[in-house]
Each structure stands twice: as structure tokens, then as C-alpha cells.
Image (spheres, coloured by chain):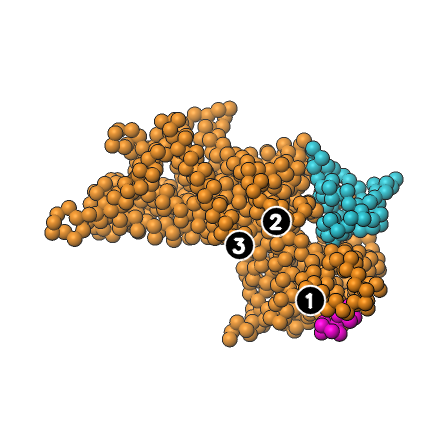
Chain colours: A cyan, B orange
Amino acid sequence: MGKILGYDNDSLKMPNKIIEMGLLPDTAFRILYQAPFSGPMYVEFGDEKSRIALREEEGNYIIVEELN
Amino acid sequence: MQDSQKKQVLLVGNPNVGKSTVFNALSNKKQKTGNYAGVTVASHSGTYTYRNEEVEIIDLPGSYSIYPSSEDEAIFSKFLIDEQKNYAGVIYILEALSLKRGLLLFQQIQDLGIPMILVVNQIDQAERRGITIDILKFSEALGIKIIQTNAKEQIGIDDLKEAVLHNEFVKTGRISFETPVEHKDFIQKLVSHKGFDNEYKAWMSLSLGTDLGRIESIVGLMEEPDSKSLVPKRLQVQETVRRYQAVDKILADVISKKPQFKELLTEKLDKVLVHKFWGYVVFLMILLVIFQSVFFLAEYPMNWIDTFFSWLAAFTSEHLPEGPVNSLISNGIVPGIGGIVVFAPQIGILLYFLYLLEDSGYMARVVFLMDRLLRPFGLNGKSIVPLVSGTACAIPAVISTRNIENLKERLLTILVTPFMTCSARLPVYSIIIGLIISDGSFLGIRYKALVLMGMYLLGFLVALFSAAALKRFIKNKGKTYLVMDLPTYKKPLFLYDLKMVLGKVWEFITGAGKIIFIVSIIIWFLSYFGPKQHPDQFVATNVELDHSYLAKMGKGIEPVIAPLGYDWKMGVGILTSFVAREVFVGTMSTLYSLEDDAPEVKVIDKMRRDVKPDGEKVFSFATGVSVLLFYAFAMQCVSTLAVVYRETKSWKWTGLQVAMMTGLAYFVSMIAYQILK
């Protein structure tokens, strides 16, 4: 479990789709799976339990904190 | 005039919310639906008539925002904004399970002052999960009437038609997006100087970045030209975050749900289907099941069809009056058409499986699994969808690349997708494999099926490696990324998909039938007439095939194709294949039916017996392999080329594709023949 705090300063390089899909500050999420060889992550997030696939590179734009 | 009286209505919403299902429920036209974001990558239109009013509905590609990040979203935005004068309003579709995501785009469109009807689809799904939506409150909060539908069951569709009839499209004056304080002054100046209807329109033209040129020309408006804060991308991010905050507030009042609901089916299935190891095993198993069915299940109907056409050819030959027309019909047209119809079962089975996979939500998992593996080849996980659907036909596959955001990855996918073994190659492969591979089996799988599977694998590998080779020559514009919705699994629409498949197969038969009909007639004419044999003749009629104009032409190209091991008849077959690959079979059927007058003998047996003048078999193992390789690699489909040109808007890439594929085909086939002969 984790929570999104914000985005990396360099948000100009970050694909807008991340935000458009609803990965917003204060959203809780869980990484459920990851494809082999550091492939995409399978993330479940938000109240609507949306599921999304994103690569590690995209994940790196998002600043998160761990929740327990 | 009649066209302008038609009321035009747009269907808009996020990807995968059921737009195409609503479209199909409204109109009589059938359109492919799926459970994968990006099934509608081109805009489609259909019509219906309700109480004497004719309505044209346009199904636009789904989008998450007015700001496009891929080609299909760009089509959507452009249409929505540019065509405002022409359409009566927008039917906006929200999926009850993801209201939040859907309201982002809804409010953007609302703020643009575009009249809308709001539809909430699949409420039953939400209820089943213990989520209750207070529709009255929701409607009040948004200032718009809400129609509830369950499009799959046709529920609510009449309400929707009624609303369209009475023009219940609402244009709320309010604007839900408040211009951020730091830009307020500038935006207000922009509104008054540039004549925007409202602040949001001015804001959007800044955020889209399209009007920057104009903005710079009025830079005097800015007291302190703070260009850094006016970067379009920053504005978009700011807008999205703010809108979501507002949407959260609305939804908090509207939705109530039992805590801790779990998507049990999706959770359970994904434990296996996206598993690091089992996920790939299952994917391979699914592919194997599909191919097994394509070859073994289809065999029975194929035999019936084959027998029927042989009988029909014999019947027409016997009962029509003797003469040229008899020979044209029973030797040319009937076997030509039969040669194609016989592959309808295989194509149908393949398509049916692909449709079921798309419906179920599995394709998004395949993208997830394949992304990492495809990246070294310069492709994106999303490329797997065009590659897999390319096994049916490259045309829709090339169009479906539109939801790949990165232009380089999209171009690469377009260039290599035609290497995938499409259904038009299947007839050619089947007939050649039938001729050169023996009947034995290995571990219970027959050699013929193994070779055919090998051809599919070959197509896939060549697609991958040519992508890896081509990626050096394409400049990368923009970043590559994968941010993709993973939908919940849904039960596929078995019956509905079956209807779709039958429609598609019928299209294939009639489409190919028409071409083959024409080609057969031309070939027959060229083979019926020949250069004059007596001085007093103008042309010779009813000549031996070897003395016909056709043979003359075929023999003319023989020097080019001889290194590949082909005789003139195959040369004619390959030439006609450049219209469409499957025509090869029709041409061969016609040619071999012409040779002797025993229509009841199957064409394949005649081909097997045929020998070259030197006594060597025409379809020897070496020639067969050479033909297989030629058809695997050569770009022989005019329709695909037209679509590739349309999608790339570049003669350079289209030309390169033809040269690369056909050159490779010639080269590889020649080497194979020279080694094996």
C-alpha cells in the first residue's frame, strides 16, 4: 500500500496520461504485479479500484509514501 | 438537401465505457465492440430513424481528456471542436463503475459550451458491486438530465432516442473550471481581445498550445511575460488536477457504497493471467488452441464446401450448352469462387476467437505481459494488438495502431504488421502445404499443421526482427511510455460476436468473390484466345492453353521468376496476387481447370500431377518452399498499401515497405529454391 504525494519537479516530461487516468495526489494505491525483467507494473488505485499498467519509468515521476 | 436535414449526434466518452455498444443498440449497423481501450480507433457513423426523424450518430474514438496524447484521441478532439456547427449535440457516456475518470472529459466539453445529453451506462454492474448512485442528486450537481442505460440489454435506448428527438441536449451556462488566480488577468484580457466566448475557451487554446503563435503576437497583453508558467503542458496538468478535486467533491455526495468491495473475478483471474510465468504459459496455450481449432475444426466444413463446388462445376459443365460460356463458368468462375469460399470456415474461427479475446478484457493483459519483451525491438506493448489481429487482416490491424502514443513505435508497428500471417495467405499456404508436405504426424500433430504453425511463427519473427532493423532508421519524436487501463473481465458476447463474424466472413467472400470473378474472366479470355495459327485468322479461339495469349504473357515474365523455381502459370498467379493474395488460389483453380476437361477432379490433384517440360514436378518441394516464403514476405495487398499510406501520410514509408517486403521475398525465395532444388 502507498499513497501518492505529488509528482517529480520535472513534470514537463511526465506523460499527462498518468494524471488523466486518475493517479492524483492523495490517492491510495497498491502494486499488485509486475511483469518479468522489470516490465510494467500492475497498479490498483483510488476508491473506484481502478487498475492500470505503467512502466517503472513512468512510476519514477510519481512521488509516493508507504502506508501500512 | 436530405443530408443536411439529418440530425447529427456524436457519441463521446472514455475508452471502453460501452460507446460502441450504445452505437450498435441505437443504429442498425454492426460495429466491433471490445473490452480494450481503443477498439474504435476511427470514427464510424450509422443512422437510425425514430418517429420519422432520421438521426446520424457518429461514434468517436474514446479519450480521457480534450488534450490528445495519441492519434485516435487527436481525431476525437479535432472532430469535437471543428465540427461544432454541424452536429446537434453530444451524447456523453459515463460508465457507472468509473464515474470519476469520465467526469473529467465531461466537464471539459461542458465548459466549451457544447450541448450534451448524459448517459450513465452499466448501472447494473455498479449495483452488483454494492455501489448506489443517487441519480437525482448527480443530475442536479451537473446541471444536466441523466439517462440510465444498459446498452447490452437494450435497456434505456428508447429513452435516449426520445431525448434526442426532443433535442434535450443541455448547454449549461456554468463553467466548472475556475481559472487559476495567477493566470486570471491574462485570460480575461485574452477573452476580451480575442473574442473568446468564455474564459475556459481562452484557457484551452493556451493549453492546447495551438494558438501560441497568436499569443506571442499579442504579447503586449502580458504585463510580465511569464512564459514559463504558460507552458501548455503545465496548464494541462494544472487543469486536470483541479478538475479532479472538484469531481471528488461532487461524487462524495452522490455515491454511496458498501465498504471493501472486491472485484473477485478479476482478482482471481489476474493471479494467473498476469503471472510472471503462468501468464505466458496461458497466452501460448490460448494461441495453440486457436490454431488447433483453425486447422482441425475447420476441416469438416471445408471438405463439404470443396465437394459442393466440385459437384457444381461438374453440374454446370454437363448442363450448360457446350461452348465458350460453358467453359468460362464451369472451368473459370465456379472453381475460382470455390477456391475462396472454402477458406471461410478457417477465417471465421480465427476471427471469432480474436473477438472473444477482445471482449473479455484479456487483450489489455497481453499488452501488459508483452510490453517488456517487445521493447528491445523498438515496439510498444500495445503493438501486440495489431500484430495479433494482423493474423486476421492487416487493414484493421494497421488502423488499430492509432492508440500507440509514440510516433516511432506506431510507425514501426505499421511497417511490420503486414508480415503477420493474414487470412488471405491461409488459402495459399494450405494449398502449397497440401502439395509438398506428407501426411505423417509427429507426437499426434500432423506435419501439415506443424508447417502451417511454423509459417505463422515465421511471420511473427520476421515482423520482430525487421522492426529491430528498421528502428535505427526512424527518428524518435517524443517519449515512449505505457499508461494503460486494465479493464475488469467481462463475459464475452458469444452470440453477438458470432453475428459479427458471420458478417465479416460474408464481406470477405463477396469482396474476394468480386475480384476473383473479374480476374477469372480476364484469365479465361486471355487463355481462350491466342495468336493466330492460320494466316486468315484474326485471332485463334479455343486454343490449347500453351498457345494462348496468357501463356505468352506468362512466359514473358518467366526469366524473372525462373530463379525462384516458378513456371509461367505460377508467374500469372503471383501477378494476379498483387491485387490480393487469395486471388492466387482463384487463378490457379482457373488455370488448372482450363487445362483438361475433367472438372470433377479436384484442382489440387491436377496441380500435383503437373510437370514442367523437362519432366520435373511443377510443385516440387523446392518450389513449394519458395512459394511459401515468397507469400510470407512479399507485400502483395493493394488495400493494405492504401491504408498504410493513409495512416503514415508518407509515400516514402509506404514505398519503403513495398521495397523491403518484396525485395526480401524475392531474395529469400531464390536462395531457398537454389539450395533445395
Identity, as a three-letter code, of the amino acid under mark 1: Arg
Identity, as a three-letter code, of the amino acid under mark 2: Leu
Host chain of mark 1: B
Host chain of mark 2: B
In-image side of B199 versus B512 (left or right): right
In this orientation, does residue B354 appear?
Answer: no
In-image side of B18 versus B398 (left or right): right
Q: Quick one: quadrant of the C terminus of chain B?
A: top left
Query: How far from the left and from the top, in percent, is residue B498?
Result: 54, 49
Residue placed under numbered mark 2 in the picture: B407
Host chain of mark 3: B
Q: CA distance from mark 3 to mark 1?
A: 27 Å
| Label at residue B649 | 3
Judge if badges 2 and 3 mark residues of a common chain.
yes
In-image side of B564 versus B171 (left or right): left
Q: Is residue B653 shown above or below B206?
A: above
Query: Of callouts 2 and 3, which one flags the residue occurring earlier in the amino acid sequence?
Result: 2
Q: 10 Å neighbourhood of mark 2: few (<14), some, or many (≥20)?
A: many
**Which residue range is magenta in the image?**
B187-196
